[in-house]
Image (cartoon, grey):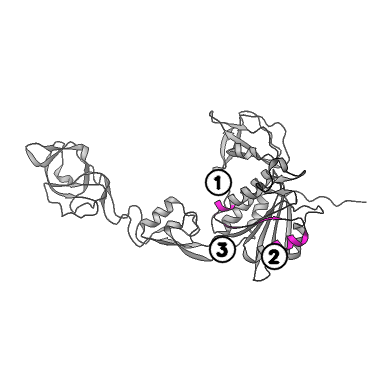
Amino acid sequence: MSTAPRAPLMSLDDALQALLARITPLTDAESVATFDADGRVLAEDLVSALQVPAFDNSSMDGYAVRRADLLEPGVALRVSQRIAAGHTGQPLQPGQVARIFTGAPVPEGADAIVMQEQAEPVPETPDAVRFSVVPEPGQWIRRSGEDIRQGQTALHRGQKLGPAELGLAASLGLAHLPVLRRPRVALFSTGDELVMPGDVSPQDMPPGSIYNSNRFFLRALLHRMGCEVSDLGIVPDRREATLAALKTAADHHDLILTSGGVSVGEEDHVKPAVQSLGELNLWQIAMKPGKPFAYGQVCRQTAEGVAHFVGLPGNPVSSFMTFLLLVRPLLCQMQGMSASALHTQSLPAHFAWPKADKRREFLRVRRNAQGGLDLFPNQSSGVLTSVVWADGVVDNPGGQTIEPGQLVDFWPFSECLA
């Protein structure tokens, strides 16, 4: 009896391209206070209604001067006024200078600022100061609009807002910002072997049971991606329970995310349940860890449209890595952000990897004090301590061995876990 040839493994790049081709960015927007917009994604371009700064101002505590009056060092000039931030001065006349402070408007007629350390009082003339320098044109003057011009797009649609972006938005006078609504993600685990920490003490764990670690790091990763997460807990290994969980999740969420339970075993009910409610594609990806991956769509029962479904591997490191490499770009695209490839650094390996795998490997490593990379000794997909210890991975092409000192592509976790 002949057996059909096994389909070739899909490359990670092809899998990502196929996944993103199915994702349409969200369009629903809402207005939130700028104070509360950290981590949100802009729903439209922000065009400045003013110049930033709005006026020429001093970037130093010192003296506003006319350069024509200071053609050589040692010149003494009379201080005619004092200008603090939040106040305006009078036009500067020839032979006069203005005492000025950081952020204060530069008076008309002044064309440079001399810092206070380069001037000293004239003892015999109380209202005069002597300058030790000849100023350069425009020195220490922040020009109106040098940061942002009126009518300029300061922040763009699809841009994720962080502390710097919020400060920039506030400098435009914006107390509220238009942002896309958060992706709604339903998260659940399958498996009768799973136990929640706190429900059973370690010494009382039944044989064959394990604590549900995936649920914790996946929930944290989803929150870091700006998602609203509905944690549906652990779904029993029964078809009816799996169908009920999927129906509930699809009606109110954009994405359903699970880990484990998408193989062909008799107790793996996710695959037939998703297929009965929509469609499912099982992808075998040429990556290690993380070969099994499922994508599908579940039709909503009480509303139009579908919810995307992603099934991650059950092994924790596989689940962690496939989230970073596939689910994270999916969520970026769903929020209108760039889903471009992560940037790697070329660093020397301070280890040997003599046995090449056919699949593209992601080796957990950590930078050392010598500027190279150390390898975690156990690269098993079930060893979650490797991810805790590591600060990134080596992206090693399939069939590639590594010798000590060889330059490798290092991808830091900070690229996507900030």
Q: Amino acid at mark 1?
A: Leu
| Residue 286 visible | no
| Pointers 1 and 3 in contact (C-beta within 8 Å) | no
Mark 1 = which residue?
Answer: 417
The span from disc 1 to disc 2 (Cα, nearest Å) is: 31 Å
The total number of labels drawn is 3
Helix, strand or loop for disc 3: loop
Q: Nearer the viewer, mark 2 or mark 3?
A: 2
Q: Does 41 appear in magenta?
A: no
Q: From the top left corner, tell me how far across and down residue 280 is, in percent.
A: 73, 59
Residue positioned 70% across, 61% down in the render: 245
Mark 2 = which residue?
Answer: 247
Residue positioned 20% across, 55% down in the render: 88
Compare residues 69 and 244 and report the one nearer the observer: 244
- Label 2: how many Cα within 10 Å (few below 14, some 14–19, many 20+): some
Sequence-first disc among 1 and 3 = 3
Sequence-first disc among 2 and 3 = 3
Residue at the right extreme of this rendering = 1
Q: Amino acid at mark 2?
A: Lys
Residue positioned 59% across, 50% down in the render: 221
Give the side of residue 222 with respect to residue 114, left or right.
right
Q: Which mark is residue 26?
A: 3
